[in-house]
Image (cartoon, rainbow, N blue to C red):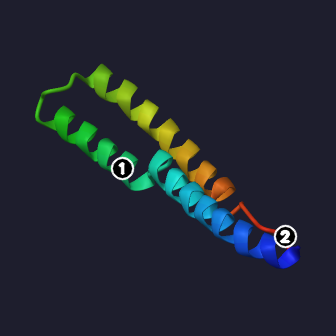
Amino acid sequence: MFIIDDLLLRPIVAVGNVIHSMAVEELYDVGAIRDEIKENRLLFEIGDRSEEEYERRREELRTQLDVAREARETLTNKVEVKQ
């Protein structure tokens, strides 16, 4: 019975772990948020964004960045299979 469980469940759990890791990477992509912060600054500097728009967006992005960092710490590699 345990051999069958190992043969059937381990691949499913392994795929689940990969999917979980990919979802965390996609949802909480720190690099993409940093790129948005840079883009926001650039748009402000070239005059496409007002100062108040820039400040509002900057605060939103910094909040997202903090949440993403915390979520990645919490969620990365948290799915385990007990033997």
Tell me what residue is drawn at x 73 percent, y 66 percent: 9
- Of residues 4 and 16, which is closer to you in this image? 4
Give the structural element (helix, strand or loop) at label 2: loop
Question: In the image, what residue type sits under mark 1?
Answer: Ala
Q: Position of residue 50 (x, y in %)?
A: 22, 22
Q: Quadrant of residue 12?
A: bottom right
Q: Residue at x 36, y 29 (%)?
A: 57
Q: Which mark is residue 10?
A: none
- Residue 43, x across and y down, in percent: 18, 35
- Image quarter (top left, top right, bottom left or bottom right) of the N terminus: bottom right
Q: Residues within 10 Å of mark 1 (few under 14, many from 20)?
A: few
For residue 82, the mark is 2
User: Secondary structure beneath disc 1?
Assistant: helix
Residue displayed at 68% across by 54% down: 74
Which residue carries the number 1 mark? 32
Vertical placement of residue 3 versus 39, above or below? below
Residue 27 placement (x, y as % from top left): 49, 45
72 versus 40 height, above or below: below
Choose between 13 and 63: the one closer to the eye.
13
**Crowd tier of the residue under label 2, counting other residues whose Cα lies within 10 Å: few below 14, some 14–19, many 20 or above:** few
- In the displayed structure, would residue 44 be above or below residue 42? above
Between the C-alphas of marks 1 and 2, the distance is: 34 Å
* Residue 70 falls left or right of residue 62: right
Q: Earlier in the sequence, mark 1 or mark 2?
A: 1
Q: CB of mark 1 within 8 Å of CB of mark 2?
A: no
Residue type for callout 2: Lys
Q: Quadrant of residue 40?
A: top left
Q: Position of residue 82 (x, y in %)?
A: 84, 70
